[in-house]
Amino acid sequence: MVYKICGRWFAADRHCFGAAFWSDMDVQMPSGLTKNENLEVIKEDWPGNAVDQRGRFINDEFPFLPKMSGLLKWQLSSNRFKAEKLADTERVEVRDPSSFLASDDDGILWLGHASFFIRLNGVSILTDPILGTPPLVKRYVEVPSQLEKIRRVDYVLLSHDHRDHMDESTLREIAQKFPDAVFLAGLKSDDVLTEWKSPGNQVKTAGWFQRFDTSGPVNFYFVPVRHWSRRGLFDTNLRLWGGFVIKSDAATLYFGGDSGYGRHYKQVGELFPRIDYFLIGIGAYEPRWFMEAVHNNPADAFNAFRDAGAKTLVPMHYGTFDLSDEPPSAPLRTLRAEAEAAGMRDKIRVLSINEDLRIR
């Protein structure tokens, strides 16, 4: 969800619609544990996701609830990057994906923001798809929908319920065109997804460190991230957020959704010691005092990549929407500097929007 208030754009991760219901006095007190009892747990001794006294999910390492005081402080403060941001005209290139979409090759195609079309062992996967222009979003670049060119979708992976990741209009279109596609998401996300799907679409939900009950050559695992959830007035943290590990004989991919930095990256690397492609967000991180709890900056993203011991970092969540204070070209420029300083520039694989990376 994105609103323009007092000349500033507020996206799903920080909108102030219904802000009167954000209480600075509210705290989360753990009161129980939950998981999908029908699914395999892949981490030894993992008891399930903690929930608080109101049934809201809690981050494993850094509990987080949005606070009205923080939002107002940011809204009323000046942007120290304002001049640099206004002068920054560099934009992500948008290409034509027709060749890859018409092929049967395995690969990773970036559709912008956190949206990827992935083909692995012949299985077609979409992550956090936004195929078009959501209402009220301020774009850096226009990206036309490729839904007409996508011939098959087997799975749709949804990291969390924020509207720049779980887009109702896109998901309804996907469900209509691909009535057999399976939607995979965190616990309690089925309330909205069931409303949007076609009768043939299945919705499957999992807790952290659980494997989805899918069949075929690709396995899907839901893993922790440091974030939160909310779509409306009264549903803060009622749907579980997370990342995905996508594993087949051909390759293992990590898709991180939205996250702040934490120990979960090392945990994922310990459980999956051969991650080939590490898809992680690098943008929407300023002002740092406000964004650190929920979004990595480029240094965090690079450290997360190293923590996980992955082979190739594919950056995302930058250059598509104007969601925060930093200039649009800063995330990628900073990430490259981090990799250069570590002597690992060759480990970063930057994609233009609609560019593909073939998996051989």
Image: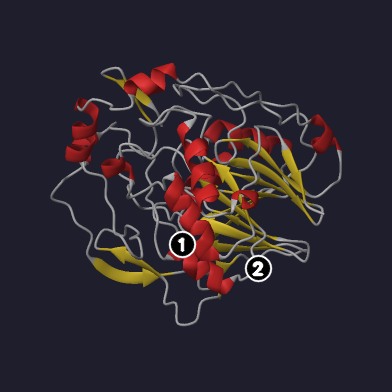
Q: For mark 1, what is the residue?
A: 224
Task: Name the residue type under label 2.
Answer: Arg
| In the image: residue 142, left or right of residue 102 | left
Which residue is found at the position 75% from the left and 27% from the top? Answer: 96
Task: Name the residue type under label 1.
Answer: Pro
Distance between the alpha carbons at the discs numbered 2 and 1: 18 Å
Q: For mark 2, what is the residue?
A: 274
Q: Check the image and name the residue furthest to the bottom.
A: 45
Q: Check the image and name the residue furthest to the left.
A: 25
Nearer the observer, disc 2 or disc 1? Answer: 2
Which residue is found at the position 28% from the left and 32% from the top? Answer: 16
Q: Check the image and name the residue furthest to the right.
A: 103
Which residue is found at the position 50% from the left and 18% from the top? Answer: 89
Q: Does 145 appear above or below 24?
A: above
Q: Does 123 appear above or below 79?
A: below
- Residue 191: tell me if it is visible: yes
Element marked by disc 1: loop
Q: Position of residue 123 (x, y in %)?
A: 77, 53
Figure quadrant of residue 101: top right
Q: Does 219 appear above or below 181?
A: below
Q: Callout 1 environment at 10 Å: few (<14), some (14 to 19), or many (20+)?
A: many
Q: Position of residue 142 (x, y in %)?
A: 59, 21
